[in-house]
C-alpha cells in the first residue's frame, strides 16, 4: 500500500472542490433566475430526478426543498421506467440531475415528460449533452476538474450539483419569505423544531397539580403542599395575585436562621421578587431566563399577569429542549 500524507491529500481535495464552486458562482447566468421563477409557480410538486450518484444528490435536494417550503418528491430514474414515473403530472415541475447529461434512463423518460405537459429542467456537467439540449432550461455546473486524481470518480461535479440544488432551495426560500416558524412546522420531531414550536403552556404544571398556598399558610402546611405536589416549590397566591414563591433554597435559609418556624406564616420566608414568564412564550425562552438567573423553575403567568403554572428545568430536559 502506497504511503501518503492524508492531511495533504484532504486539503488538496477541498481546494479543488472549493475552486470548482468559485468558478460555478461566476458562470451562473440568468438561466438560474429563469429556473427559480418557473419553480416558484409550481402548482404541484417539484420532482427531482436522477440515477447513481446524481440520484443521491437529487434525493438530498428534494428533502431540502420540502423542508424549506417547496413540496418535493424524488424519483429514481431507473425505477421511473418501471412505474414510478406515474407519480408525475402536468402540475409538477421536474428538476433533472445528471453530470454526463447522457444517462440513458433519463433520456428514455424525456418523451414521457413531454407528453405529460410538465416543465422539466436539468443540472448537468455538459451543456451540449442530450439531456441539456432537450429540456426547457439547463444549468451547466461547468466543472473543469474532479478532485479524484484519476479524474474519474464524481467529486467536484457532485459537490457542484449539490451546491446548485441548495442554491435553488435557498433562493425559493427567500422568495417565499420562509421563516424559522415555517421551518419548525416541517421539523416537529427534531430538536430545532421543538425549540421553535414548543410553548411554555405545553410543558408547565397547572390546575390541580399546581402547588399553591396563601400568604397566611403556615410553613408546616406549605411543606405538606410541596410534598404532595412533588415539584419542590409552592406559589404564594392571594386573590389570584402572585405574592411570592417558596423554594427548597428558601427552606434551607429558613432552617438556618429560625429556631421554630413551622407555625409561622409562609409570607415571612417566601421570595417576593419572583422570576416569571408568559404561558404563550416559547419554552426555549424559559430556559434562557433560568440559565441567566441560575434558577430551576419559573412562575407562569397568563395574559392578565395572574399565576397559572410552573415550568421547571426538568420539564425542558424531559421535552428534549436541553
Image (cartoon, grey):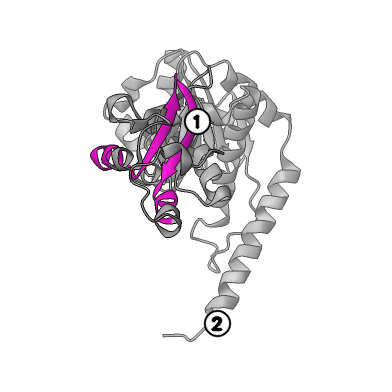
Q: Classify 37 as above or below 267.
A: above
> Quick check: can you spot residue 72?
no
Q: Is residue 174 found left or right of 276 in the rendered image?
A: right
- Residue at 66% across, 47% down: 142
Query: Tags 1 and 2 in contact by the CB under 8 Å rule?
Result: no
Residue 167 picture quarter? top right
For numbered disc 1, what is the local secondary structure? strand
Q: Classify 245 as above or below 261.
A: above
Q: Which residue is mark 2?
A: 5
Residue 186: x and y in percent read 43, 29
Taking the view exactly as shown, the residue that stands out farthest to the left is 228
For numbered disc 2, what is the local secondary structure? loop
Question: What crowding class fits label 1: few (fewer than 14 Cα within 10 Å), some (14-19), or many (20 or more)?
Answer: some
Residue 248 is covered by the magenta coloring? yes
- Residue at 46% across, 37% down: 267
Residue 91: x and y in percent read 46, 13
Q: Nearer the viewer, residue 208 or 319?
A: 208
Q: Nearer the viewer, residue 235 or 92?
A: 235
Q: Which residue is mark 1?
A: 243
Residue 255 is covered by the magenta coloring? no
Residue 118: x and y in percent read 48, 16
Q: Nearer the viewer, residue 129 or 289?
A: 289
- Residue at 41% across, 56% down: 252
Taking the view exactly as shown, the residue that stands out farthest to the right is 26
Q: Which label's residue is closer to the chain start, 1 or 2?
A: 2
Q: Quadrant of the N terminus?
A: bottom left
Q: Classify 64 as above or below 305.
A: below
The part of the chain drawn in magenta is 224-252
Residue 268: x and y in percent read 47, 41
Q: Is residue 160 found left or right of 271 in the rendered image?
A: right
Q: Nearer the viewer, residue 96 or 46?
A: 46
Question: What crowding class fits label 2: few (fewer than 14 Cα within 10 Å), some (14-19), or many (20 or more)?
Answer: few
Amino acid at each position: 500500500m502506497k504511503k501518503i500524507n492524508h492531511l495533504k491529500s484532504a486539503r488538496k481535495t477541498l481546494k479543488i472542490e472549493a475552486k470548482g464552486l468559485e468558478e460555478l458562482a461566476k458562470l451562473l447566468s440568468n438561466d438560474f433566475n429563469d429556473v427559480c421563477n418557473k419553480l416558484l409557480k409550481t402548482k404541484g410538486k417539484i420532482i427531482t430526478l436522477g440515477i447513481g450518484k446524481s440520484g443521491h444528490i437529487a434525493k438530498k435536494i428534494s428533502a431540502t426543498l420540502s423542508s424549506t417550503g417547496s413540496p418535493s418528491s424524488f424519483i429514481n430514474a431507473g425505477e421511473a421506467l418501471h412505474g414510478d414515473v406515474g407519480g408525475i403530472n402536468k402540475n409538477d415541475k421536474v428538476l433533472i440531475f445528471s453530470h454526463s447529461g447522457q444517462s440513458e434512463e433519463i433520456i428514455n423518460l424525456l418523451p414521457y415528460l413531454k407528453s405529460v405537459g410538465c416543465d422539466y429542467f436539468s443540472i448537468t456537467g455538459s451543456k451540449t449533452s442530450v439531456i441539456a439540449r432537450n429540456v426547457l432550461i439547463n444549468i451547466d455546473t461547468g466543472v473543469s476538474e474532479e478532485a479524484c486524481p484519476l479524474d474519474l470518480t464524481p467529486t467536484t461535479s457532485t459537490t457542484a450539483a449539490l451546491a446548485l440544488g441548495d442554491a435553488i432551495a435557498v433562493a425559493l426560500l427567500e422568495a417565499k419569505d420562509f421563516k424559522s416558524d415555517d421551518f419548525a412546522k416541517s421539523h416537529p420531531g427534531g430538536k430545532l423544531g421543538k425549540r421553535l414550536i414548543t410553548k411554555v403552556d405545553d410543558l408547565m404544571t397547572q390546575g390541580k397539580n399546581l402547588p399553591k398556598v396563601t400568604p397566611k399558610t403556615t410553613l408546616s402546611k406549605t411543606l405538606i403542599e410541596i410534598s404532595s405536589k412533588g415539584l419542590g416549590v409552592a406559589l404564594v397566591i392571594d386573590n389570584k395575585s402572585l405574592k411570592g414563591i417558596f423554594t427548597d433554597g428558601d427552606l434551607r435559609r429558613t432552617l438556618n436562621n429560625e429556631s421554630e418556624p413551622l407555625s409561622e406564616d409562609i409570607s415571612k420566608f417566601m421570595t417576593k421578587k419572583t422570576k416569571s414568564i408568559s404561558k404563550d412564550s416559547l419554552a426555549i425562552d424559559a430556559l434562557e431566563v433560568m440559565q441567566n438567573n441560575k434558577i430551576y423553575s419559573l412562575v407562569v403567568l397568563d395574559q392578565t399577569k395572574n399565576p397559572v403554572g410552573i415550568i421547571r428545568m426538568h420539564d425542558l430536559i424531559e421535552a428534549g429542549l436541553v
